[in-house]
Image (cartoon, rainbow, N blue to C red):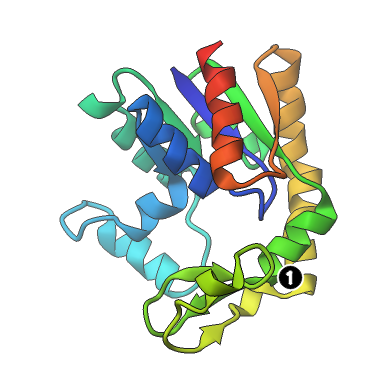
Amino acid sequence: MKVLLLGPQGSGKGTVGDIVSKRLGIPAISSGQLLREIPPSHPRFEEINDLMGKGVLVSQDLVASLIEERVSREDCAKGYILDGWGRAMIDLKYFDPGYDKVIVLVLSREECVRRITGRRICDSDGKTYNIYTLPPEEVAKCKGNLIQRADDTEESVNKRLEIYYSDTMKVVDHFRALGKVFEVDAGGSPAEVAELVIKVLQD
């Protein structure tokens, strides 16, 4: 089963995708992770590394080629969950394998902003914590300082959400017309949301 996972920033796509992946035994593939983890032996390593080092967006055709390489591996034979792709209609021009289901995580704009502005990185262990959604005892596990990423401010989050509502929703509408969209309420914990996604995928 080929699954495309969409949703606004803060909806928990990465975490939910990982839980579903482990439960169903199919890989969760993130386009961003593919770029970050590209091995030096890859023929386009230097090109991608150079672009990312300069903070320049890697072209769609290049990202699409990495995704195609990844999904052609044996562990994807029974399916996969793809996250971080299909954010705009132009993405589908470069890679659209004919998804079986498109899962859209639905979360209010206010909650997206709250979750992302509450996100902190521990400068000691590198883990991500959330001062709003995690219990205080969990947050206290950070032995160093909790740092907010520069792009996790309310202004920056709202800019990213505008792109989601203007560009990605066109992709959602495209797949909705094909009868492939299944919306899932992302207001619960990642484990709860993952259960809802699994139910949709197993129906």
The residue tagged 1 is: 156
Percent x, y for residue 58? 48, 56
Residue at the outermost front position: 137
- Along the line of sight, which residue is nearer the eye, 163 or 83? 83
The crowding category of the residue bearing disc 1, from other C-alpha atoms within 10 Å (few below 14, some 14 to 19, many at least 20), is some
Q: Is residue 25 above or below residue 147?
A: above
Q: Residue at x 61, y 37 (%)?
A: 193
- Along the line of sight, which residue is nearer the eye, 56 or 174? 174
Indicate the quadrant where residue 190 lies: top right
Question: Left or right: where does residue 47 sit relative to residue 51?
Answer: left
- Along the line of sight, which residue is nearer the eye, 68 or 154? 154
Q: Is residue 53 above or below residue 182?
A: below
Question: Left or right: where does residue 40 sit relative to residue 167?
Answer: left
Residue 84 at least partly seen = no
Q: Residue at x 46, y 75 (%)?
A: 54
Q: Is residue 76 above or below residue 165?
A: above
**Secondary element at image label 1:** helix
Question: Left or right: where does residue 10 sit relative to residue 155?
Answer: left
Indicate the quadrant where residue 132 lies: bottom right
Residue 82 at least partly seen = yes
The quarter in which the N terminus is drawn is top left
Q: Residue at x 27, y 58 (%)?
A: 45
- Along the line of sight, which residue is nearer the eye, 57 or 102? 102
Percent x, y for residue 38? 28, 55
Percent x, y for residue 199? 56, 20
Q: Amino acid at mark 1?
A: Ser
Percent x, y for residue 94? 51, 33
The quarter in which the C terminus is drawn is top right
